[in-house]
Image (cartoon, grey):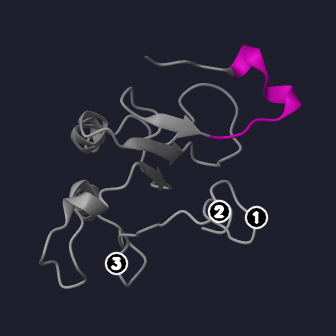
Amino acid sequence: MGTLVGGDGIGAAPGARWTACKGYKDDGFAEASTFIACAQFMLCPTDTSGANPDCSKTPAVVSNSWGWSPGETAFNGAIEAWNAAGILSSFSAGNTGLEGCSTTYSPADQPPAIAIGMFTRSQLLPNVCVRM
């Protein structure tokens, strides 16, 4: 969060407010349904007990690091709902270090998502795959 929100002049948007939703279970595992519930929460956040929805707290931007097998479409509806609500969403491309096509994790590899990743000089254009 320090990179995104920061403070004292540090970060991409110092002083911005943020919210979070716990997608992983206590044992470190995740289920798609939990992440979809978090996506729904972001559309109209509630208090910590899950009551008192306050849609004025809907974020303008969500930044996600969900990592599922390439080609997974379970999250497309949630991302499309964010898009329809005017929420800009970005997803980590996977950070696997693999070259070539089909190495980006979902949901970053799906058309409704904006993928954020990096590449090295040796991974320039010949290895870039665009899916629209």
Q: In this rendering, does residue 6 appear at all?
A: yes
Q: Which residue is mark 2?
A: 14
Amino acid carrying label 1: it is Gly
Q: Is residue 78 above or below residue 16?
A: above
Q: Which residue is mark 1?
A: 9
Q: Magenta residues, as a range?
A: 117-127
Horizontally, residue 92 falls left or right of residue 45, namely right
Amino acid carrying label 2: it is Pro
**Which quadrant is the C terminus positioned in?**
top left
Residue 126 lies in the magenta stretch: yes
Seen from this angle, which residue lies furthest left? 51
Task: Out of 46 and 99, give the one closest to the viewer.
Answer: 46
The Cα–Cα distance between marks 2 and 3, rounded to whole angstroms, is 30 Å
Counting from the top left corner in percent of width and height, residue 92 is at: 55, 47
Is there a contact, CB below 8 Å, between mark 1 and mark 2? yes
Q: Which residue is mark 3?
A: 25
Task: Out of 87 and 104, give the one closest to the viewer.
Answer: 87
